[in-house]
Structure formats: C-alpha cells, structure tokens
Image: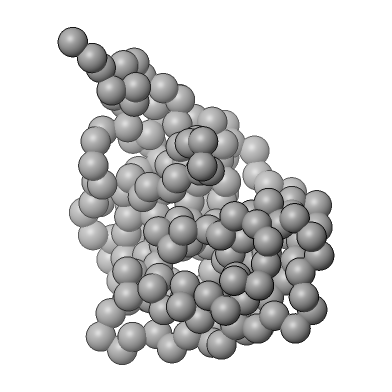
Amino acid sequence: MSVAPDRAAPRKLRLFFALWPADRHRAALAESAAAAVARVAGRAVPPGNMHVTLAFLGSVPAQTFADLVGVGGQGSWPAVSLDFTRIEYWARPKVLVAMPAEVPAAGQEIVERLWEAVAPLGFAREQRPWRPHLTLVRGVQELPPADLEMAPVQAAADEPTWRLALVDSAAHPEGPRYKALADWPLLGGASPLEFKGRSPSS
C-alpha cells in the first residue's frame, strides 16, 4: 500500500495572508501581462499562483492554523482596488513584477490589522514597508527590456475582484504552488470560512 507524500505525516505549513483574485480577474490579469512575460527569459508564474501578499508568516506549526483562521474571520475587511499600471524588474530576487500606481489605503489598513492580530501568536512583523505587487516571472536570466507594459485591468461589475485569503506555499520541483486554505470577502461582514481541499493538519 502506498501513501501520498502530503498525507504521510503532519507537516509545518508555510503560510501567508494575501489578496486572492477572483478567477475571472486572475485570467484578465494574466492576459494583460502575457505580452510582457513572453519577452522575458525566466519562469512565468502560473495564473493560478497570482496573488498580492499582505503578511508573510513563514513556517507555521499545523496546530496554529485554527488561530490564523480566527484572525481572518475576526470582522469586516475593506474592499481593495489595485490597478497595475507599470512593470518593474527587481534585481536581487530576480523577479518581474507588476506594480499599482499607488499603495491603496484599504490594503494598508488590512496589513496593519493582520500584523496586530498575529503578534500575540508570536509572529514578528516584516520590517520593510508593504509594497503591493503581482509577481509575473521568477528566475529572470537577464536584464529585461525597459519598455515592458501591462494594460490596466477593469474589475468585473458583477463579481468581487479580491478576497482575503490564508494561503499555503508548497515546494515543488517546478516551483512553489499556492493554495488558499481559507478565504473571506472584502467589504462587509465576514462569511463562514471556505476550506479548499484537505485539512492542512494531515
């Protein structure tokens, strides 16, 4: 009898809170960035991995997961608008990213509330200021062209664009895979959490 590797024993989770795009918005973002991504030598981020990190927590014992779910479900979260208008190359991590015209105040509010809520759980806050970005290419092999562009993506009127999500990062040979384990709506009261797939404790 064989046992799937991720069910063989409990593992520590590698977690972060993020703005998680709706499927239709994710597809539109990927389409808008496709021409720029095609001109860069590196590993294109799969559309399913696209997100905007809010608070990176790192390695987390599985038993702490329920406490973090409680953080996400603690109340109403403001809606966030992000219009990605320019593309940047970050040389040190060798990534190509899409950047918004400005840091949204609502996003900064969520960041502050998250770090305040996880501090009693023993998580140390990231010292660098929050820079909302959408990673497009990893492992960039050479300096990208300077004229890369990404057209702004219009949010769908009948669908929320972003949700707050607690995301697991699992290592794979072809690169990390991200999975939202729980998520909550922005703007309005928190809804019951939505679990995606298996329990993270197994």
- Residue furthest toward the top? 1
Q: How many marks?
A: 0
Q: Measuring from the top left, give residue 100's x and y in whole percent.
A: 62, 78
The residue nearer to you, when weighing 12 against 39, is 39
Please tell me which residue is depicted at 75% across the width and 55% down the height of the picture.
Answer: 141
Please tell me which residue is depicted at 56% across the width and 60% down the height of the picture.
Answer: 44
Image quarter of residue 146: bottom right
Of the 4 image quadrants, the one containing the C terminus is: top left
Please tell me which residue is depicted at 66% across the width and 72% down the height of the picture.
Answer: 39
| Residue 32 showing in the rendered view | yes
Residue 145 located left or right of residue 120: right
Residue 143 located left or right of residue 42: right
The residue nearer to you, when weighing 116 against 61, is 61
Q: Measuring from the top left, give residue 22's x and y in whole percent.
A: 34, 69
The residue nearer to you, when weighing 172 against 63, is 172
Residue 108 located left or right of residue 95: left
Q: Measuring from the top left, give residue 130's x and y in whole percent.
A: 67, 61
- 94 to 12, vertically: above or below: below
Of the 4 image quadrants, the one containing the N terminus is: top left
- Residue furthest toward the left? 1
Residue 125 located left or right of residue 186: right
The residue nearer to you, when weighing 6 against 109, is 6
Please tell me which residue is depicted at 68% across the width and 51% down the height of the picture.
Answer: 139
| Residue 104 showing in the rendered view | no
